[in-house]
Amino acid sequence: MQLEISPRQRNQQEEEEAEQQQRAGEDTVGAVFSIEPWLDAAAVLVPPLNFAEVNDGIFRSGFPAADNFAFLLSLKLRSIVYLCPEPYPEENTRFLEQNCIKLHQFGIDGSKELLVNIPEEKIREALKVILDVRNQPVLIHCKRGKHRTGCVVGCLRKLQKWCLTSVFDEYQHFAAAKARSTDQRFMELFDTSSLMHLTASQC
């Protein structure tokens, strides 16, 4: 015997099915938004501001934004050397954690004063991290990739036996109109003797 469903029961069933479909749709939408954009295989690779290769396995740039994460993944980074004193943003920290990239922070004040005291010991410690092949590929960055990053790279160039003219030319290429004489003076006087034990292959 076949039971006949009343119109009221049929309407109730249809409403329940519609609710289930709506909930399923909401779950799907939530799942889509939970996928990190840098995992999209079709993502456009956009390098950060002032990005450049310094040496094999060593890169420099300004502060990476979320739009740059897919590009950073393509570099297969092991480490980031961050030269600002401010805490690393939550979104950037999550990106590093999810991709097993270690953050090394050396907070250097970005003061615009001409007589700013650049902390030589922090530059020295940052260079030790950068030149350790276990940390490479490594990205060096500050806010704009000009002054703090420029000083670190300039001191690295001295280790590589670059002449000062070439060191300053590279610094000015990135700093442009914002070049600081105090930065160049710091690089000129930077003593590389305590880092000379680092092998030429690391440089």
Image (cartoon, helix red, strand yellow):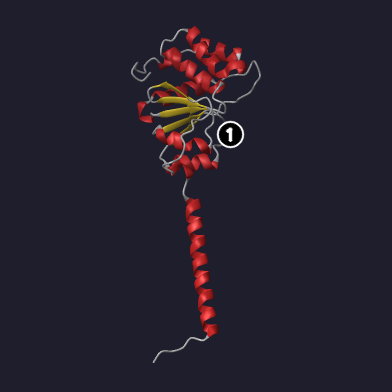
Asked which quadrant contains residue 58, the reply is top left
Q: Residue furthest right?
A: 113
Residue 96 point in image, percent of width and height:
46, 39
Residue 158 percent coordinates (x, y) = 45, 12
Q: Is residue 26 above or below residue 48?
A: below
- Quarter of the figure with residue 185: top right
Residue at point 44% right, 89% down?
3
Q: What residue do we see at 43% from left, 43% from top?
A: 39
Where does residue 9 sit, x and y in percent of width and height? 52, 83
Quadrant of the snapshot with the C terminus: top left
Q: Residues within 10 Å of mark 1 (few under 14, many from 20)?
A: few
Q: In this figure, which residue is indicated by the disc labeled 1?
A: 86
Left or right: 180 in relation to 21: right
Q: Position of residue 116 (x, y in %)?
A: 62, 18
Task: Tell me the residue at 40%/23% (across/down).
Answer: 131
Q: Is residue 70 above or below residue 142?
A: below
* Residue 193 or residue 180, whichever sits in front: 180
Q: Secondary structure at mark 1?
A: loop
Q: Name the image quarter holding residue 157.
A: top left
Q: Quick one: which residue is furthest to the bottom in this view?
A: 1
Q: Residue at x 54, y 74 (%)?
A: 15
Residue 116 is left or right of residue 28, and the answer is right
Residue 77 in view, yes or no = no
Under mark 1, the amino acid is Glu
Total number of numbered discs in the rendering = 1
- Left or right: 153, with 180 as reference point: left
